[in-house]
Amino acid sequence: MPEITLDGLGKHFGPVTAVENLNLQIKPGSVTAFLGPNGAGKTTTLRMVLGLVRPTAGRALIGGRPYADLPPTPDRRRRPWPGRLSLRA
């Protein structure tokens, strides 16, 4: 498993600061919890790591690369976006 690095990561939605100057390095094999109150920026941070939201500052890297640049693997398949998932048989 590659290292995850957040380097000065930040996101503003207009005048609202969701994440500001987040620096984090997660080493392979470590157990890490991502905790905070509602509105603390946890989901926004994870969306930036996965390339679903573009940061207004900094960068998020997995193994030294943005998520979008990672090579495909058998366990990294495209899945339907929420709202498009059908539970019909």
Image (tube, grey):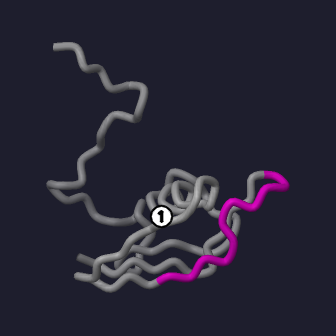
Residue at x 39%, y 71% (from the top left corner): 33
Pick whichever, 64 or 88, lies toward us.
88
- Camera-side residue: 14 or 41? 41
Residue 76 versus residue 82 in the image, above or below: below
Left or right: where 33 falls relative to 47: left
Image coordinates of residue 15 in percent, x first then y, are 84, 55
Residues packed near mark 1 inside 10 Å, few (<14), some (14 to 19) or many (20 plus): many
Counting labels gives: 1
Residue 15 drawn in magenta? yes
Q: Quick check: 43 above or below 29? A: above
Q: Main secondary structure of the magenta part?
A: strand
Tell me which segment is drawn in magenta: 14-24
Q: Identify the residue position indicated by label 1 in the image.
A: 49
**Residue 64, quarter of picture:** bottom left
Give amino acid for label 1.
Answer: Val
Q: What residue is shown at x 54% (from left), y 62% (from top)? A: 45
